[in-house]
Amino acid sequence: MSIEIVNVSKRFGDFVALDNVNVSIPAGQLTALLGPSGGGKSTLLRIIAGLETADSGRIEIEGVDATKLSPQKRNVGFVFQHYAAFKHLSVARNVAFGLEIRKRPKDEIRERVHELLKLVHLAQFADRLPSQLSGGQRQRMALARALAVQPTVLLLDEPFGALDAKVRKELRDWLRRLHDEVHVTTVFVTHDQEEALEVADEIVVINEGRVEQIGSPDALYDTPANDFVMRFLGPVTELGDRLVRPHDLQLLTGGGESGAVPGRITRITRVGFEIRVVVAVRDQFVTVTLTRNEFLSLDLHVGSEVQVRVAPEVANSVGQSRVLGAV
Amino acid sequence: MASHPATRTRRGPVAYLVRLLVIVYLFLLVAWPVYLVGKNTFADGMDNINGILEDPDIVHAISLTVQVAIIAVIINTLFGVGISLLLVRYDFRGKRLLSAMLDMPLSVSPIVVGLALVLVYGGRTGWFGPALEGMGFQVIFATPGIVLATVFVALPLVIREVVPVLEEVGEEQEQAARSLGANAWQTFRRITLPSIKWGVVYGVVLSLARSLGEFGAVKVVSGNVLGETRTATLVVEEKYLNFDKGGAYATAFLLALVAVACIIIVSVIRPKEDR
């Protein structure tokens, strides 16, 4: 295990940011710390980097106890949400910073900087100032700067949070490809579940200072440990006292299948390829999502009488049924 | 900042009236009186200027003023940058009190500062003075006292320029530098100092101008001994009271010239995007 977080707690005044957190982050993988804002995930990342100190607990990086080490001695690369570019230094000097501090020979620095700038596709901008770059370019520069010192772990704090949706998507794919090339143990903080599901090998869900669940994206999505994780990772709706994903529900127009509940369609919304159908079932409104083809073959209209049930393959694959309120 | 919205050009009679009012006000209050000092200085050609430059006591006074100002500016710059870092980057008990105390030199009359310094460092009756004098170190009625008084009155100027810049720059660049392996000094030298450079320069210039021109506090602590502890501002008063108006205007002109030159030089070399 590359990073061990043992019994870490942190308070800011009365606010409990982290409450006895234990996480093992595997080496060489891309791990996401996912959770709502203010849940403690950034604090955990900053504690790993040494930018904050834990009130209690221990941090190990590659088997070395780093709890008391200053950030300069931890050999971590840190990437900030707002880039933290050195504004008075050129792009190349920014990337060279860590190497200059380490007093590497000039030729080696020049070579390594050029190599890294090529890796992040900024070779032609080497002599510009950060203020002359776009947000996405600045963040790539910050990444190159962090990678330059060959850190044992790379930590990214909401790295794409300040970018617009399109650039964010591009950089996300790019980070995944970069990680496949460089293979450095990487931890990134995000509140965007789609980002975590798409990029990460492993996701740690953190809420209100506690770890809710740790697992692969598939495991988290398909078998969430509790309602919080289920709600946070994707859309949910309630059928009876059960929390289910809208796309795991089926609509039947025929009568009396087992486990199906009768209802009446109250609303149909089309969002691109997806059709959202709201069905009034007894005192509930249940949302069901269908593909366009499913929807057309069923010939549904507002007011149609239908049967709602959980798709049989889903009902079988989930070991225990989750009951509302069992957090 | 490059993102400032362009100033709108206002037109119409009210706008012109307001502008006229401001110009007249500044003219009567600042420009005309300062111009008259210059005009009186050169009323007889270079006679007044030559007169004071040929008087060794006045040359001594001017050089004393310059020396004191330079020492005071160095002390205030080192101390000011340090205190600014403390105020912006660290949290501690009594921080607000410290911040309020730092403004005191601006609000207290310099003559009070002078008297207070005499009470502490006075050679005969001061709280700390006799002990220092016993060690052969005279403060009051000597150069150290003048430096002390000057440092006191110009104390907040660097701090008040640097603190807002430090706040605006934020801590992230420094944290990034630390995580890249820089120690505290390397971080300060390579990251913090370049980003607050212009704040420091501006603070230094204001301190220099203020230090050159200090009068009240210096008058109390210096003893005003001709050729020894009389500074340029004291010369101006002395000459003026002795009906040597030409000498007074000439010395005043030199003082004003240096201060104005400082401010003009900085506003010219300061990069546009910083303002």
Image (cartoon, coloured by chain):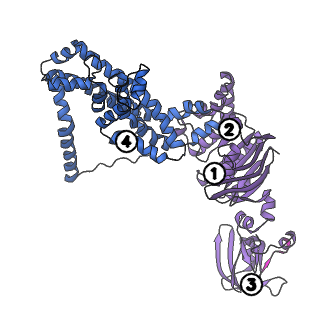
Chain colours: A purple, B blue
First-in-chain label (1 vs 3): 1
What separation in Å lies between label 3 and label 4 (alpha carbons)? 79 Å
Image position of B225 with respect to A249: above or below: above
Residue indicated by mark 2? A70
Label 4: element kind: helix
The amino acid type found where label 1 is placed reads Arg
| Residue under the image location 44 percent in, 30 percent down | B77
| Residue under the image location 26 percent in, 20 percent down | B225
* Viewer-nearest residue: B201 or B264: B201
Question: What label sits on residue B45 in the rendered view?
Answer: none
Asked if labels 1 and 4 touch by Cβ distance under 8 angstroms, the answer is no
The amino acid type found where label 3 is placed reads Val
Viewport quadrant of the C terminus of chain A: bottom right
Left or right: residue A240 versus residue A302 is right
Residue B269, image x and y in percent? 38, 29
Label 1 or label 2, whichever lies nearer to me, is 2
What separation in Å lies between label 4 and label 1 (alpha carbons)? 50 Å
Label 3: element kind: strand
Do the residues at pointers 4 and 1 share their chain?
no
First-in-chain label (1 vs 2): 2
Asked if labels 2 and 1 touch by Cβ distance under 8 angstroms, the answer is no
Q: Quadrant of residue A185?
A: top right
* Viewer-nearest residue: B235 or A322: B235
Residue indicated by mark 1? A168
First-in-chain label (2 vs 3): 2
Label 3 or label 4, whichever lies nearer to me, is 4
Image position of A287 with respect to B170: above or below: below
Residue indicated by mark 3? A306
In the image, which residues are magenta?
Answer: A308-313
Q: Chain of mark 1?
A: A
Count residues near mark 3 (Cα–Cα under 10 Å), then give few for <14, some for 14-19, many for 20+.
Answer: many
